[in-house]
Amino acid sequence: MIRASLLLLPVLFAACDGEPPAHLRVAGGDPARGRAVALEYGCGACHVIPGVRGAVSWAGPPLTEWARRGYLAGHLPNSPENLIAWLRDPQAIAPGSAMPNLGLSEAEARDTAAYLFTLGAGRVPQVPAGLPLGPKEAGPREEPRIRPRA
């Protein structure tokens, strides 16, 4: 039984992009359990979430490349502590938000945050946050933009 479980580990993390940088690691969080929490609570009814079966809805923002996001809920820095707080009680942070309070426990929120921070982690640019991007580094806009937080 244990041997079969070990064979499934690569499948569980197929959608993960790698280990998050140290400042985005969630203490006590388990990304595999977090992926299961996202599936169990039906997060895919509103979000696109890589690695979560059926999570293909665009009612809410896609959660792809989560580790590269600078902000959450439009105004909080994207950090493990803030994401856990958001997942536990989104209405306390952004009253009137379409994000419902799902009643996640502290452990479930930690695990879910740990999973989300694996998404895009392998592609986090290794440049200091706040440095302007050059004209050819960020798509079709000619004006400089700010680099995402690493």
Image (spheres, helix red, strand yellow):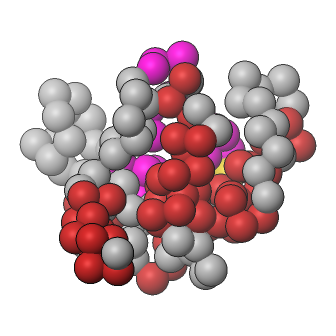
Q: Is residue 142 visible?
A: yes
- Does 73 lie within the magenta span? yes
View extreme (front): residue: 1
In the image, residue 131 lies at what x, y percent?
A: 34, 62
In the image, residue 50 lies at what x, y percent?
A: 34, 42
Q: Is residue 18 visible?
A: no
Front residue of 120/39: it is 39
Q: Quadrant for the C terminus, please.
A: bottom left
Question: Which residue shows up at 55% across the image and 44% down it?
Answer: 38
Q: Quadrant of residue 148?
A: bottom left
Question: Which residue shows up at 10% across the image and 42% down it?
Answer: 136
Q: Quadrant of residue 103?
A: top right
In the image, residue 18 lies at what x, y percent?
A: 28, 68
Front residue of 82/126: it is 82
View extreme (left): residue: 136
Q: Magenta stretch mostly in which secondary structure?
A: loop
In this view, 26 is above or below 121: below
In this view, 47 is above or below 131: above
Question: Which residue shows up at 46% across the image and 19% down it?
Answer: 58
- Does 90 lie within the magenta span? no
Give the left or right position of residue 21, taking residue 30 as reference.
Answer: left
First to last magenta residue range: 57-75
Question: Which residue shows up at 59% across the image and 41% down it?
Answer: 40
Front residue of 116/52: it is 52
